[in-house]
């Protein structure tokens, strides 16, 4: 279940994506907090994961969280796991939202009981 729905974005025990935080340490969080994060990703989004939406002069729009910045450029980590660097001088607009890159409704592809197993799995990391 984790490999199917979560690991494209989350690392767990050293394997997986880097769109969201490494979940190896979440076993310390109570189960109900984990459940809330999974069912309502936008409930609480850490400032560093807030979504920036950029539009450039040549009409490109992209969104993701800020993974690096310099005086001349911004680098976004996108939901696809890629990094995109844009020169500040080419930006025509920039918006910050409190929304998560983590999609709503992940539980809709699960069978009854899967969430319970998934949370037990997340709490079992060593
Ligand atoms: C498209 C990428 C994506 C997918 C797929 C995804 N997540 Fe996330 N997840 C994120 C991002 C980005 C954050 C950080 C922002 C936030 O808190 O919503 C996050 C945050 C979380 C958090 C809070 C972590 C913390 O440190 O408090 C948990 C728990 C979590 N995800 C669990 C899951 C589980 C379980 C799945 C699979 C059912 C999953 N995620 C699927 C991107 C994703």
Image (tube, rainbow, N blue to C red):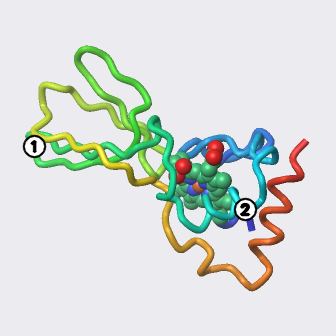
- As helix, strand or loop, the secondary structure at mark 1 comes to loop
Q: Residue at x 46, y 41 (%)?
A: 49
| Cβ of mark 1 under 8 A from ligand 1 | no
Where residue 23 sits, quadrant-wise, is top right
Residue at mark 2: 32
Decide: is 78 above or below 4. Answer: above
| Other-residue count near label 1 (Cα within 10 Å), few / some / many at <14 / 14–19 / ≥20 | few
- The front one of 43 and 84 is 43
Estimate the x, y position of residue 51 in percent, counting from the top left: 37, 46
| Other-residue count near label 2 (Cα within 10 Å), few / some / many at <14 / 14–19 / ≥20 | few
Task: Pick whichever of labels 1 and 2 is earlier in the sequence.
Answer: 2
Image quadrant containing the N terminus: bottom right
- As helix, strand or loop, the secondary structure at mark 2 comes to helix
Please tell me the numbered disc located at residue 58. Answer: 1
Q: Residue at x 31, y 16 (%)?
A: 70
Q: CA distance from mark 1 to mark 2?
A: 45 Å
- Nearer mark to the viewer, of 1 and 2: 2
- The front one of 58 and 46 is 46
Estimate the x, y position of residue 92 in percent, counting from the top left: 10, 39
- The front one of 89 and 122 is 122
Tell which residue pokes out farthest to the top in this image. Answer: 71
Q: Residue at x 27, y 46 (%)?
A: 53
Please give left or right for residue 47 compared with residue 34 in the image.
left
Estimate the x, y position of residue 44 in percent, counting from the top left: 51, 51
- The front one of 20 and 35 is 35
């Amino acid at each position: 279940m984790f490999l199917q729905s979560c690991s494209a974005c989350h690392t767990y025990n050293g394997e997986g994506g880097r769109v969201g935080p490494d979940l190896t340490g979440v076993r310390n969080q109570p189960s109900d907090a984990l459940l809330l994060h999974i069912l309502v990703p936008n409930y609480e989004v850490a400032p560093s994961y807030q979504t920036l939406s950029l539009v450039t002069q040549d009409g490109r729009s992209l969104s993701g969280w800020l993974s690096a910045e310099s005086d001349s450029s911004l680098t976004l980590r996108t939901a696809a796991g890629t990094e995109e660097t844009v020169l500040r001088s080419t930006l025509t607009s920039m918006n910050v939202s409190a929304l998560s890159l983590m999609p709503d409704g992940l539980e809709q592809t699960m069978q009854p009981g899967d969430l319970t197993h998934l949370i037990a799995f997340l709490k079992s990391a060593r």
